[in-house]
Each structure stands twice: as C-alpha cells, then as structure tokens.
Amino acid sequence: MDWHLVLSPVWSWPLIAFAAVLLYGLVLVTYPPRIQALPTGRRRLMLGLRLLSATLLIVATGRPAIEYSEINERGAEIVFLLDQSRSMNTPDGPGGLTRRQQLLKTFDEIQKPLEALRENVDIRLIEYAETSLAVDKLEPPAEGRFTAIGLAIDELKKNASSKRLANVFLLGDGAQRATGEADIDPRTAARQFATQKSVPIHTVCYGTSEISTAGMDLAVEDLLVASSTFERKIETVKAKVRMVGTPGQKVRVRLLIEDRTGKTLGQPGEWKELPLTPDSKPFVDLETNENATVMPVSLSFVAALPGEYKLALEARPLAGEVKTTNNRQESLISVSKGGLRVAYIDIPRVEQKFITRINESARIQLDNFYAPVGNITKTPKIEPEMFDAGRYDVYLIGDVPASAFQRDGINLLDRLYDRVMEGAGLCMLGGQYNYSTGGYGTSRIAPLLPVKLNGAVLPAGQSDPSRQIRQKLQILPTADGNSHFLMLIDTNNNDQAWRSLPPLSGATRVEPRDGTVDILAESAEGAPLLIATDVGRSRVAALAIDETWLWHLHGRADVHQRFWQQMLLWLAHKDQDGDQPVWVRVEPRKFAPGGKVPIEMGIRDPQGQPVDNGEYTVEVIGPKGSSKITPQRQRTGATAEFLTTTDPGDYWVRVSATSNGQPAGPTAITRFIIEARDPELDNPAADPDLMNEIATLTGAASIPPEKLGEFLETLLKSGISTELMTNHIVNLWDNWWLLGLFVTVMTVEWWLRKRNGLV
C-alpha cells in the first residue's frame, strides 16, 4: 500500500503564511505579559499550549489529508444479460427446443469455463424482459411481457456495481418489442454504453428470423389509412399481410366497419363488411406457395356520409389458426362535409314556416316537402327521389301519418330506413297524427326511433287524446341535457335561459324506448320532451313539441335559430366540427398497448380565437370503466397524458370546460384505439441482425451458442485484468480527533490560568 500527504488549502499559500505570522505574533506579543508573574516552567507550558492551539488552526486551513491506494485482486466482473421474455418460448430450435431451453442448455455446457473464470472475477446474471432483475440461478419459465433490450443495456450502464466491468454477454433472440417508456432504441443504448464504459457487449442469438416453425399464422401489419377525409371521396387503405404456414390456401382480406346500433358511450359496436361498389374494392383474396411471406394489400372504400367511423382491415382467420389477435388492425377516420342538406316533411303549419328560416345559415339548406293529407294539394309532395342515397343528410318528419309515405305501391319509409342505416339523421316532431297515432309502430322505421310505439292504426284523420299533453308546459333540460350539444343555448346559465322562454300549449306524450336512449329535455312535471340516441352510424331524435315558433314571436329568434341549427348539426354528426367552443383532439388515433396517449383540448371564442383562462375536466372511458385525469394548463388550452393503456379496445375522451366559472360550451368527445395485439408474440421472429449491430457498435463479436464455451476458454487463456486499484483519502482536518485535540489544549490552558488566578 502506497500513501502520501496531500494538501488542499482554504486560501492561497501566501495568504495562509501571512495569517500564521499574524496569529503567532499576536500570541507572542499579548500573552507573555499576562503570565510574567508565574514561575518559568509554568509560563513556558502555558505559552506552548497557546502556540499549539494556534498551530492547529493554521494546520486546519491547509486541509491536510493522507491519500493511499490498494489493489483488489478480485475487482472485475463479467455480466450475462439473459432474455426472459415470452418470445423465448418459441420452439424453433433443434429438435423442437424452445429458445429458452437452448439458452439453459448453453449455460449447462459452459459451466466448466465459468467456474474457472469465477476464480478470478465475479460472474453476475441479469434476466431482462420489460425490466431487469439480478438472479442467482436460471429457471426454465420465460414469462416477461415484452423484450426491452435497449432498456436492459441502459439500466446496466446506470446501475453499475463497485466492480470494474470487464465484459458483457447479451443472450436472447434479439427482437426489440418494447412499448411506451421502455422502448429505448438498442443501437443508441449500445453506442452510449460503449462510449461511457468502453466495455464490449458480446451477443449470442437464439431463434431464426423465419417463423415457419411457429405454426399457421396470419398477421396484418403497417396499416395505413387517412385520419380524416371528405364525403363521397374514394379512400385507399394499405397494409401488409404476413402469411406463415399457409401455402396453397386462399386468404380473404377485407375491410370492416363498426355498427354501433343500440350501443352507448363506452360500448364497442359490431363489425360488418363494407359492400362492393363500382368505386370501391373492399376485399381481396391472397394466395401464396411459400411457407412464409409478406404481401402488400391495397383496398378502398367510399366515405358516403360525414361522421366518425371505425374501420378495420382483417385477414379472415383460417381453420387451425391458433392465434388470431393479430389478424386485424383498426383505425378511426373522420369524414367531413362542407354543407348540410335537410328534408323537412310536414303539413303546412306555423312551425314549418319558422324552421325554414334556418336557410339563412350558409351551412344548411332545408327543403320543404308537403305531405298530401286531406284536401291539401300544395307542392312539392313526397317523391321517391328525395330518398335516393346521399340526397339528404337529415330528415325531419312533422305531423304526418305513415300512410302519407305510400307512393305508387311503394312504401317510402322503407327507403328512409335504408338512408338512416347508411348514416342520415332522423327526427320526428310533435303532432297529433304521427308516432303511434300515425301508424309508425308497424313501419320499418319503428325500431330506429328512440320512443315506444304500438301497432295500433287509427282511421285517417282520427287522433288519440291519450297521446297528447293538453296543458301549458316549458321545455327544460335534464341533468344530462344541460351540457349536451343539443340543449346548450347559453354558456353562462343554461338552465335559467330555458326557464326564461315562453311556455308552450302542449306536447305529444312519448316514452323512452329503453335505457340506452338519452332523455335530454322534459317538462316541469317530468314528461319527456326530447329523446335522442345513436343508431348504428346515424343519430335519431324525438322532439315532442311543435311550437318553437313561439320563441320567435317573443323576441328570442336567436334561441330558436341556435336550437334548430344545433339539432340539425347533431343529427348529421357535425356537432364536433371545428367551430364548436370546446374541442378535444388525440393524434394519432391508434396506439400500441402500454403507450402514452397525448390529449389536447381548448376553448374557442365566437371569433374562433383561443380562450386562455379555461378550466377543464377530462374523463376517459375505456373497456374496463372510466377514470379522470388531471390536465396541465397551457397558454392557449391544456394537455394531458393517459397512461392506463394495457387493455386493448376503444377509449372515449370526454372534456367539459368552464371559463370564468361558467360552462364554455357543450362537452367535447373524441375516441382513440388501443390495438388488440401482442407485440411480443404477434411476430416472434428472432432478429440476429440487431444482435450483430450491437456487437459491432461496442467492438465485440456475435457468437454462435455452441461456440460460447470455446470463446470463454479463449478469454480465460488470454487473461483478464482482474485487479482493481482503489484510491482512498483520509482527511486529517475534518474529523473528531483534530477538534478534540484543539478543545483539549484550550481547556488545559484555561484550567492553568484559572488555577493561577488569571481567570
């Protein structure tokens, strides 16, 4: 052991020398006169003690220390990073061995050189998957959720032991399959490791990049589809289909669309095939003679109507295919439209006259159609052409019986049913001769309306008094309706705004169809007045009143126009258009399990400018319930991150906002998807190329499993520097004994002065 004295002075040496001279001079000039009456021996002792205390102070300013070094004969270690993820259970080794079994077999074979190495260096075993864990011995199961090679290398760099790292051996299948924060690029991690540690990472790869031995499997990969488009535009959907173990078999690849009929927020819909049209190609049949191949696919569809749709590209599962979670990839697409066309079918009455004023809006074109009832012969009448596909976005039905839709032996309500199922909105207003009284209970559109209908058909011109409410009433928003887009007429005090409107003379008595529909408005006595719901790709509503024109006559034309504009926009799926005050956005719309989902939100003023004083409430509704997250305020809105993304499926984001303590607008809603796939097992192919890159980047070698023992023996023969020199510093100034010595000297000197009467 070699040692020497080191000094680290508080000040510069000239300043310390000056302080020493000053301190010694002060003692020699001021102290002797005080003790001159004492005997010579005692004077010398007390002066010596005072000079010793000054010396200790001077020594402390130099901060002396003893530095020594020692050599640790076992100061080095070798680390083995071992893959413990589920892909290591793939049986693509000799004789059907899994990769994990091959790895354990390799360790059995290298026990002799390992024992020889252990005589000079420490051997550390670390298993890695989604995280790393040091182990004493290896067990057969490979249960890690996914493979995070980059994270394993990064953690080794950060959590190094006190030993000098001599070599690292990375054993696994080499396929990085991490998600979220664990998805650290292995190449970047290896490059940084080599730069900071100067230690080679030797790689040993198990498995093959060909997964033909994994059985029959179809996988849809790299789905590419636009997140937004315009109606009637042909959209192309591209993807790749990986086909393994399917030579000679025909594989149908098709586009599917979600049907949300009868579903509420948070519930997934059913998948239906898109129909073949002259302008679209919604399916294709693939066939290959190879045992494993990847084939590109390009399909198309026509976005017929505006709204938000969920699409999927699926390789139809084959008989005998065990794993089908990777057969389909899903995406969301928003279809926009520049304008809005509405067909309003009614008898001539005051309500129709005032609703028609909606045409003053540049966005909405409302066409009136008069029903041929009684002696009324006004035109235009109900004609079959008005129910052509894509002709109208919304249909309003007033006080018209179902019989009015009979035309030349054709029931036009059947065509209306088809249009609604394709995405057109539908609303029935209050009246005496519609709903059950008008015979709609036996029509094809009966299941679409959100109210209960009976099958009774009254004679023409006869009404049912029991189906009418003949007393004054006000339309008031329910708790759900108060923040709903349909019922928001005042962002400051919506409920009071509705109460300030003039009462109506009555309404049609309606009842909700079931618990899946939303009651948005009712009378003070609790009679439902506005019921709405989603039906598949469409929205339908039942408005039990027909006197909104009274609002106009009482000076509230603004409320009348706003209510009807919001009604038509909602029915046409345009309530989330860019001019709504509260907005929420998630981009992209699709995420892998475990990923972070960024959520942006904000408020616009009537001029479209951002509002910077908003307060936001964010709720995310997923497959297993809802949760609230706290957003972070930004200068022009807010952002949030949703992290609970392990469960695949649909997630709805619902954002409500206030400005200056008042509601800023209706609740904004958007949706995103967590993919129903398993990143670890969907494509369990090994990646020997990545293992070679890691070895090359760190100046190491990629070693075949059967050669690892031979490589370790060569490493042992070439000699490993096992010595680790450790430097130690012992401070002589910053410790208890220097302070104790100073206190002891001063105490003895004080005691002597006191004994001699000098204190």
Image (cartoon, rainbow, N blue to C red):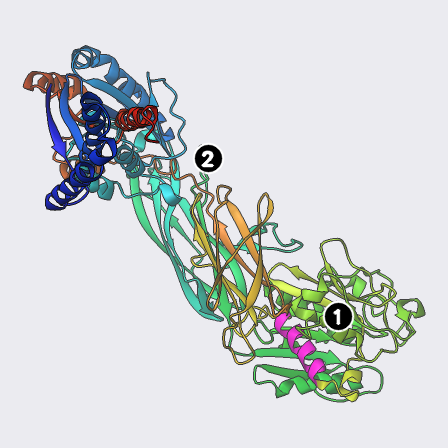
Residue at left offset 42%, top offset 64%: 235
Packing grade of label 2 (10 A; few <14, some 14-19, many >=20) is few
SS of the residue under disc 2: loop
Disc 1 marks a residue whose amino acid type is: Asp
What residue is rendered at 72% in x and 60% in y? 518
Residue 94 appears in the rendering: yes
Kindly indicate whether the residue at mark 2 contacts the one at mark 1 (C-beta within 8 angstroms).
Answer: no
- The x and y percentages for residue 90 are 34, 27
Main secondary structure along the magenta-highlighted residues: helix
Side of 339 relative to 696 (left or right): right
Q: Position of residue 136 (x, y in %)?
A: 33, 17
> Which residue is identified by label 1?
495
| Tag of residue 319 | 2
> Considering depth in this image, is 526 or 680 the residue closer to the camera?
526
Residue range of the region highlighted in magenta in the rendering: 558-570
Quadrant where the N terminus sits is: top left
Q: Is residue 171 magenta?
A: no
**Quadrant assignment, res 379:** bottom right
The amino acid at mark 2 is: Ala
Point out residue 223 in the picture as x, y percentages from the top left corner: 38, 53
Along the horizontal axis of the image, is 475 left or right of 332? right
Residue 124 vertical placement versus 323 (above, below): above
| Among the 4 quarters of the image, the one containing residue 355 | bottom right
559 part of magenta stretch: yes
Disc 1 versus disc 2: nearer the observer: 1
Give the quadrant of the C terminus: top left
